Image (cartoon, rainbow, N blue to C red):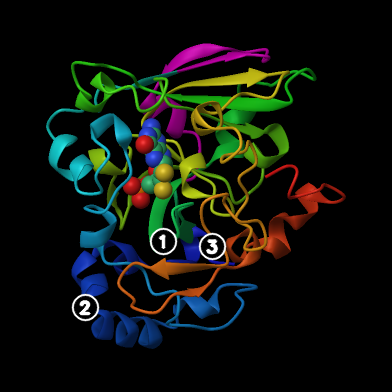
Amino acid sequence: MLIRPAADLRENDVTDQALYLDRRRFLAGAAAAGTLLGAGRGLRAATSDDTPTPFEAVTTYNNYYEFGTAKEDPAVNAPGRLKTAPWSVAVDGECAKPGTIGLEDLIKPVKVEDRIYRLRCVEGWSMVIPWRGVQLSEVLKRFEPTSKAKFVEFTTLADREQMPGLRIPVLDWPYVEGLRLDEAMHPLTLLATGLYGKDLLAQNGAPLRLVVPWKYGFKSIKSIVRIRFTAAQPVNSWQKYNPREYGFYSNVNPEVDHPRWSQANERRIGEFRRRPTLMFNGYGDQVAGLYAGMDLKANH
Ligand code: MTE
């Protein structure tokens, strides 16, 4: 798996973005430090195959429709417009200890980790991103979800003053996403506050976004202002937009095509040839059990 506890990750693995920008230097440095991605437990093959996507691409090729629908729009429109501090998150619904809590207090009790994950967009492209963040399960526990809580719903800020994209009703704003509670509590699920060892930039969903590496990228909702525990399955924005094309689960699955295109392969940003898409984005050994016995086509 492309996940390493913070203790295994050296400072300069994540703080020197120039190291990542220069692939050869990165590989040489990582090999010397014994920290090649392949050293991670359970990775399918030791590999320069999953070299992190350059910082430049991760921060300029984005989907954040609140700031425009072209890939370059968020990097142009979000910085300077999105006010990311102070920031607080309302946590409510089926839990014993609801409350609105400042970002710092939300994160403080939890260990901050650096984790390198593949990100596969439903559009057929992918990246490898070194995230910084906290395990979502550790954040959620303190609100004490009740036995009625079966799902978790996440909501993005929706402020017309800050987000020019809201003037266009591409989606029914605010952007909403949801997970089953056991998916949210899975150790791979991350609340990211940074990437490449730095705080998140606005275009990547600052100051707090979800990262669910075995699901299509649209599940990884940005700039979260509300987390709600629910008994009923939430309706996520893309499912509301077109239920035939976008499901609730949205697990990466090369065998279930999008109605308008194949999901069998993908273009890794920075590469020319398409590569095969992996079931559950390559995290099946860790997450397949969540879906045992389920029809993955019907529950797409
Ligand atoms: N979250 C919000 N609020 N709005 C969006 O438009 N786009 C999603 C997801 N989260 C989106 C969002 C999609 S389609 C993808 S692929 C990822 O963010 C992209 O994340 P990145 O721009 O950091 O690579």
Residue type, numbered disc 3: Ile
Please, what secondary structure does the residue beneath circle 1 have?
A: strand
Residue occupying the point 56% across, 38% down:
136
Residue occupying the point 60% across, 45% down:
250
Q: CA distance from mark 1 to mark 3?
A: 21 Å
Answer with mark 1 or mark 3, whichever residue precedes in sequence.
3
Residue identifier under label 3: 3
Where in the figure is residue 53, as x and y percent of width and height? 33, 67
**Left or right, 141 with reference to 90:** right
Quarter of the N terminus within the rendering? bottom right
Q: Is residue 29 above or below residue 169?
A: below
Read off the magenta span.
Answer: 90-111
Answer with mark 2 or mark 3, whichever residue precedes in sequence.
3
Where in the figure is residue 296, as x and y percent of width and height? 75, 50
Please tell me the numbered disc located at residue 47: none
Residue 183 occupies quadrant: top right
Residue 169 occupies quadrant: top left
Residue identifier under label 1: 125
Q: Is residue 201 above or below residue 195?
A: above
